[in-house]
């Protein structure tokens, strides 16, 4: 009779929930915006100096709070457009100027993308959104959502997010205790 594997799974689940509800829920983002997880080599973001762990907070003075803002802005651009990207990096806000967008069609082969601007970053969620998913993994989700979040947790190491790299750790601060 082997209890070991089942116990290990139960303990891992218990510690995962403790991490989520106990630790992540208490953290506050230092800056809202779109968290950059990956940058495609030799594309506009890479040439401008954008790196994983940076937070895109504005594109051409348009505030970027979440993936909808990010996508909506890029939908309104064309290949060859020149934009300014404001980022939060290492505790500082700076603007990267004269970033020339490429043609998204060259990377997707989707006819709807022909002529649209492409920055070349993977930024799937906001800083606050990442905290919320990790802090409340099952809140307001149906079975498919719960399975998706569970897979997200399992995949964190494959995205180099477990443990969180230092640039991402610096985006959150614990509450001050008196």
Image (cartoon, rainbow, N blue to C red):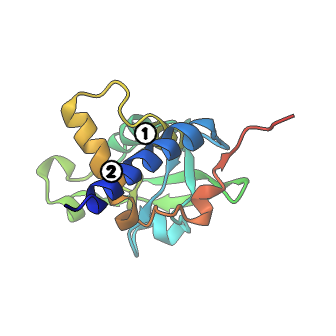
Disc number at residue 155? none
Question: Relative to residue 37, is residue 97 drawn left or right?
Answer: right
Residue 128 in sight? yes
Q: CA–CA distance between discs 2 and 1? A: 9 Å
x and y, in percent, of residue 137 in the image: 39, 37
Question: Relative to residue 158, is residue 53 drawn left or right?
Answer: right
Compared to 145, does 54 lie above or below? below
- Residue occupied by mark 1: 133
Look at the numbered disc 2 and give the secondary structure of its residue.
Answer: helix
Which sits in the foreground, 28 or 60? Answer: 28
Residue 117 in sight? no
Considering every residue shown, the one lying at the far top of the view is 140
Which sits in the foreground, 48 or 83? Answer: 48
Question: Relative to residue 39, is residue 25 drawn left or right?
Answer: right
Which quadrant of the figure contains the C terminus? Answer: top right
Give the residue drawn at x 39%, y 69%.
43
x and y, in percent, of residue 138 in the image: 35, 32
x and y, in percent, of residue 126 in the image: 48, 42
Give the residue drawn at x 45%, y 59%.
37
Badge 1: residue crowd in 10 Å (few <14, some 14–19, many ≥20): some
Considering every residue shown, the one lying at the far bottom of the view is 42
Look at the numbered discs 2 and 1 and tell me whether their residues touch, using CB distance below 8 Å.
yes
Disc number at residue 152? 2
Question: Relative to residue 141, is residue 119 drawn left or right?
Answer: right
Considering every residue shown, the one lying at the far right of the view is 178
Compared to 17, does 43 lie above or below? below
Which sits in the foreground, 110 or 103? Answer: 110
Look at the numbered disc 1 and give the secondary structure of its residue.
Answer: helix
Earlier-in-chain disc, 2 versus 1: 1
Give the residue drawn at x 23%, y 62%.
2
| Res 119 → quadrant | bottom left
x and y, in percent, of residue 152 in the image: 32, 50
């Amino acid at each position: 009779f082997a209890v070991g594997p089942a116990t290990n799974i139960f303990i891992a689940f218990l510690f995962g929930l403790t991490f989520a509800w106990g630790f992540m829920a208490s953290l506050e983002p230092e800056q809202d915006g779109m968290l950059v997880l990956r940058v495609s080599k030799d594309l506009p973001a890479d040439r401008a100096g954008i790196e994983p762990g940076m937070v895109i907070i504005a594109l051409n003075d348009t505030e970027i709070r979440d993936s909808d803002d990010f996508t909506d802005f890029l939908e309104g651009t064309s290949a060859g457009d020149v934009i300014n990207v404001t980022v939060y990096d290492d505790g500082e806000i700076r603007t990267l100027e004269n970033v020339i967008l490429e043609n998204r069609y060259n990377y997707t082969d989707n006819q709807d993308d022909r002529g649209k601007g492409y920055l070349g970053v993977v930024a799937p969620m906001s800083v606050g959104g990442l905290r919320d998913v990790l802090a409340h993994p099952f809140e307001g989700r149906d079975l498919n959502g719960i399975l998706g979040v569970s897979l997200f947790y399992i995949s964190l190491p494959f995205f180099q997010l477990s443990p969180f790299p230092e640039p991402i750790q610096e985006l959150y601060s614990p509450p001050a205790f008196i």
